[in-house]
Amino acid sequence: MERSFRIALVSPVFPPYRGGIGTVAAHDAEQLRRAGHTVEVFTPAYKTLSAKEASITRLQPFYAWGNAAVLFGLISKLRGFDVVHLHYPFFGSDILVAFACKLWNIPLVMTYHMKPKAKGILGATFAAYRAVLQPIVFDVARAILVSSNAYADEQRVVHRRRIPHPFSVDTERFSPGGRDVAQDHFGIPQDLPVVLFVGGLDAAHYFKGLDVLLRAFAIMKTKARLMIVGDGNRRKQFETLALDLKISDRVHFLGSVPHEDLPAAYRAADIHILPSIDRSEAFGIVTQEAMATGIPSIVSDLPGVRTLVVPEETGMWVTPNSVESLTVALDRCCANTELREQWGAAARVRAVREFSSAQLTQSLIDVYSSVISAHQ
């Protein structure tokens, strides 16, 4: 019988905050618990959150800036676990996690999600952090998981034990069917093809490319509707842009859809789109969710992002930050129902075959087992 581990999962963000890192961390925690392991999540406390949650410790930061936070409490809290799993980047606390693992003699596993990009002083700060502190954290880590070798190679993620480990998707929760019912649920008229965008509408998610999508949507030859799932401090800006482009009657801003309603949002759509503009987008959990739901995806031709879509089989790649390229792809998919259905069915098959939660959770447990055994 497989040994049950005590796992500390450390993440800079966690639901109810929406974002890829938090989504992956929450999914991992749920799946590992289902597999019989004890998982405690450590993440910064949110000012808007007051409810107590089992197995989630929200620590008050000594200092916080965006998704960076200094959580000194981690040093004592991490004592006694069999393994610590850090979701990176977590500026301000990753070095504290590394220190705690050395202090308490606990193996550290990391998931490398992305390399943040910025300009000016913030960009210089990121660069200095990566030059000085990142090598220390990497050296402590017994294994670094990457979503794809393509993205890791492009970002020059070098480690003695770098393991390709794509994120997983719950193919039972995200599954095909019920398009009309789902559209009624969200108040979407059933008169046109529906394109779905899922992503944060805040400044931290500038790279999602929603403005590019809106501009492409405005000049498409084929009429369609656009569902936008997500919220943030730039939502008003995007709503104003849709109004200025005279497409607001066909663009539906749904805000932050409740967790339990998210599968229905995918079922309401005919096409999913991830129009990211630069390499700050490293993978695309939303594309996996669309795949599992049986709809094709149009994604930017970026390392990591494009690995989820097989061109002309499960969707299309487009030139990043190109209104023209995106418009051509949208017109083609929206005008061809048979093509959408064919690609969507193939996407579902691939999601089940390559990204199901069961097989990738077992792969993660195998990594834990190996680093724990080697550490003893």
Image (tube, helix red, strand yellow):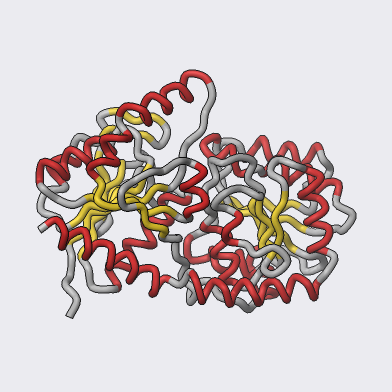
Asked whether, in this view, residue 78 is left or right of residue 223, the answer is left
Residue 122 spot, x, y in % from top left: 46, 23
- The residue closer to the viewer here, 359 or 228, is 359
- The residue closer to the viewer here, 169 or 363, is 363
Residue at the image position 42 percent from the left and 33 percent from the top: 66
- The residue closer to the viewer here, 97 or 19, is 97
Above or below, 118 relative to 193: above
Query: Image quadrant for the N terminus?
Result: bottom left
For the question of whether residue 236 can be seen, the reply is yes
Above or below, 103 relative to 166: above
| Residue found farthest to the right | 221
For the question of whether residue 187 can be seen, the reply is no
Above or below, 156 relative to 127: below
Within the image, what quadrant is residue 194 found in? bottom right
| Residue found farthest to the bottom | 1
Residue at the image position 66 percent from the left and 69 percent from the top: 295
| Residue found farthest to the top | 121
Residue 32 spot, x, y in % from top left: 29, 67
Above or below, 227 relative to 350: above
Asked whether, in this view, residue 90 is left or right of residue 149, the answer is left
Residue at the image position 66 percent from the left and 61 percent from the top: 297
Number of numbered tags placed on the structure image: 0
Residue at the image position 51 percent from the left and 33 percent from the top: 117
| Residue found farthest to the front | 160
Query: Image quadrant for the C terminus?
Result: bottom left
- The residue closer to the viewer here, 259 or 79, is 79
Asked whether, in this view, residue 56 is left or right of residue 273, the answer is left
Within the image, what quadrant is residue 167 found in? bottom left
Residue 65 spot, x, y in % from top left: 39, 29
